[in-house]
Amino acid sequence: VGGETDQALWRRAAAGEPEAFGLLYERHARAIYNYLFRRCGDWSLAEDLTSVVFLEAYRRRRSVVIAEGKVLPWLYGVATNVVRNQHRSLRRYADALKRVPPPAPVLGIAGEVADRLDAQRRMRAILAVLDRLHESDKDVLALCVWSQLSYEEAAAALGVPVGTVRSRLSRARRRLTELVDAGGHELDAVTTEEA
Amino acid sequence: MTFAPTPEFDLPSGRLSIRKEHLVAEITVLGGRPRAVTRRWPKFALAMTLLVLAGSVANVAFGLGLGGRLHDLVAGKPAPPPIEERLRNEALAERLVPLFAGKPVAEVDKAHGVMAIATSQGPVALWTVPTGGGPVCYLVEFVRLSERAGEPRGDSRCTGRPSPRATFEWALTTQGGLRIVSGYLADNVESLWLRSPEGAMDPVATAERFFLAEVPGQLEGYALIARDVRGAEIRRFEITDFMARVQDERQRKMTGPARTVIETTDSRGRPLRLLLRPSERGETCVIIEGNGGSVGCGKLSELRVAEGVRVHPALRGSIVFLEGSVGPEIATLTLEYEDGSRADVPIVERFVLFSIEREHFREGTRPLWLIGRDRAGREVAREQVGHGVFGPKSAIWLPGDVSP
């Protein structure tokens, strides 16, 4: 989406150019949307929450932390807070969400719909297991493993030291291993040493 | 079950552009939204409630004035002994600073209340003590906290008298979610205003050239504006916290959040921290927070000494602490005082931040040697601690050894 850096777009957006914010949305919506889906296990909710993340990001536009020219880690941080407090977040932007035009009827993409439903079913089963992890460990796992943020980026997203990210991830892996030992689950994506 | 992430999908067909248009429309409205006209009323109602509470506590007559001021809660009243003590200590300690060394000490019998304001967390009062030609010393007291603790709770400070050019001195005190700006106005300031991010101007309570105000919500976007007798703006300060000021003053972009490396307390029990914050060009800023702040930025390799001990005493207000770094060969650091006593000085990531207790301000008890040892316990470095921060003997204040 365009050649302008995140930083330049953000500066323009913060200076009152909503179109620049629209470009940032276009650039990062997919990543945030998928992250939110993996946190809540519901595509439709993830779509609404994606809007909430960007509205919330705009509200906090003066406190944005752009690490190495990238705004995505910070957006992940906002998304993490939004998903944690999703009821409050949705309530705050309820009026705005009511103004989103309803989805048009979907035609001719039955395969994708089936894939989405399958993903949703799978994700909910995974989340049921992950619910037994500490919330902060879950955040780190989702950011580092599923969204493939580096430790530094995850630290920036969560506002914690890099060492904390490492220790939380290690604890999450250890706990998952215990859960797997108890329940016979596979751990192919969370037992790799580096995210 | 596999914990592998599910495949990624785009937003459903057409939804990306619909959502984007919606977002742009929403923030266009948000950007131009005027301040809600009803916003002042809850504050007013709250202030009235607090007035009743404050009045019942203080058993005084009261009224609401400019900036939510509680006129008679403390104004002109002699300071209670614990507050008197805090102010006296603050003023006397200020004599450590060369500018005020030798100035008359606080006129403790004239310590008195200046004003109080209603805030979202109960009344906040400002007390002062005259110091002759010395510094302006005052205490911002969180009345409700004091009542709970049975002793004054708040921040005391001394500052120089602002010149007409400087216009006013100000400080930000935070307590829980409460943010209080306070300070002292130069003679050429007729009124002070708090400007909200939406552009609303609220008068700030002033008395005896002091001012006191609550900053509602987040700090960003708020400003203090001083006007002269004709109503012309003569000075404006954006209200920011220290971290943001670091960023502004150094004109250096911070690229990540600050990380606390050392957290301790100063000799008055207040937080004293050393933080590292990544900044542009791969540099790092070392920030010392405590009774104000300082910052130094550069490559991490330049911020820490290559070998040996480079730790110096620093004076901030009435606080003395050791700050600096040690080489990688130093495993432990011991501080030896003039009286022969010793203390272990923690080293974290080769940085050092160590508060000197007041009992070691006195000549004969001051810090003398810093001794670095390697992992085997062998002494590999020895640095003498300078005494410049303690000033001339006559300027040293210790509890109980000065009778104002």
Image (cartoon, coloured by chain):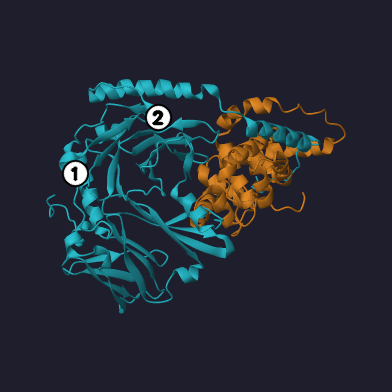
> Depth check: A32 or B24 in front?
B24
Kind of residue at disc 2: Gly
Mark 1 = which residue? B85
Name the image quarter holding residue A19.
Answer: top right
Task: Kindly indicate which chain is depicted in orange in the rendered structure.
Answer: A
Q: Amino acid at mark 1?
A: Glu
Q: Position of residue B82 (x, y in %)?
A: 19, 40
**Chain identifier, cyan in the render:** B
Residue B90 located left or right of residue B67: left
Give residue B97's position: percent from left, percent from top.
27, 58
Query: Disc 2 is attached to a residue of which chain?
Result: B
Q: Nearer the viewer, mark 1 or mark 2?
A: 2
Numbered tag placed on residue B202 in the rendering: none
Q: Quadrant of residue B30?
A: top right
Residue at point 18%, 69% (across, down): B338
Local SS, label 1: helix
Residue bearing mark 2: B67
Q: Nearer the viewer, residue B30 or A52?
A: B30
Q: Read off the chain for label 1.
A: B
